[in-house]
Image (tube, helix red, strand yellow):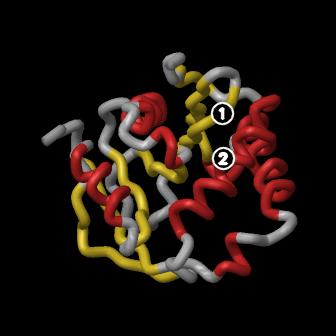
Amino acid sequence: MQPVVVRVARADDAPGMAAVHVRSWQETYRGLMPDAVLDRPDAAQRRERWWRSAVTEGAEGTQSIAVAEHAGSIVGIASAGVPRDEDATWPLEVFVLYLLADFHGSGAGARLLDAIVDDSPAALWVADGNARARAFYRKHGFRPDGSVKDDGVAAIRMVRAAATLT
């Protein structure tokens, strides 16, 4: 099997990034989000436009964007940037970290996380019902801080004060 390579995203990665974003949402959030949201016919086109903008213009405070590539195809995406939460005391927020289910457990997720935040203090929001992601982030030093929100999916905030892997 060819290795998964993690690298900085480029504008021409946008179609592959969009495909991973949509498929990962379908794999991860089926049963947690309405099917109508997950199966929108225009989802890939909307995500492609968003990723192209994020890569070329730093959309919505995005500072760091990485992709995981295997055999010439994008299989994972990640982004981080300026925290959106008013009470943030950390320098970075992880906005996106998605990996196709076939690559879970490959180490690519950890490499994507390192590519976007390295060992910096950071925070992120994760679906409360996504036990796999919550365990992944705990493994990488993130802990729930008690903050919750619901933007259609109940989410908890997890914060890492420093790179404290357990």
Classify residue 31 as left or right of residue 133.
right
* Disc 1 residue type (three-letter): Ile
Q: Which residue, as the protein is rendered here, is positioned at the far left?
A: 166
Question: For the point 43% across and 69% down, which residue is it?
Answer: 127
Classify residue 95 as left or right of residue 21.
left
Q: Is residue 24 above or below residue 73?
A: below
Question: For the point 51% across and 62% down, which residue is it?
Answer: 28
Residue 60 position within the rendered picture, expressed as x and y whole percent measured from the top left: 66, 53
Quadrant housing residue 88: bottom left
Question: For the point 27% across and 55% down, which residue is it?
Answer: 135
Quadrant housing residue 42: bottom right
* Disc 2 residue type (three-letter): Val
Q: Is residue 36 above or below residue 122?
A: below
Closest to the observer, 83 or 72: 72
Q: In the picture, which quadrant includes the C terminus?
A: top left
Quadrant housing residue 79: top right
- List the residue tagged with mark 1: 74
Residue 103 position within the rendered picture, expressed as x and y whole percent measured from the top left: 48, 39
As drawn, the label of residue 20 is 2
Other-residue count near label 1 (Cα within 10 Å), few / some / many at <14 / 14–19 / ≥20: many
Residue 163 position within the rendered picture, expressed as x and y whole percent measured from the top left: 23, 37
Question: For the point 80% across and 55% down, which residue is it?
Answer: 44
Residue 164 position within the rendered picture, expressed as x and y whole percent measured from the top left: 17, 39
Secondary structure state at the residue bearing disc 2: helix
Is residue 82 in view from this perspective?
Answer: no
Classify residue 132 as left or right of residue 58.
left
Q: CA distance from mark 2 to mark 1?
A: 7 Å
Are the residues tagged 2 and 1 within 8 Å (C-beta)?
Answer: yes
Classify residue 45 as left or right of residue 70.
right
User: Which mark sits nearer the N-terminus, 2 or 1?
Assistant: 2
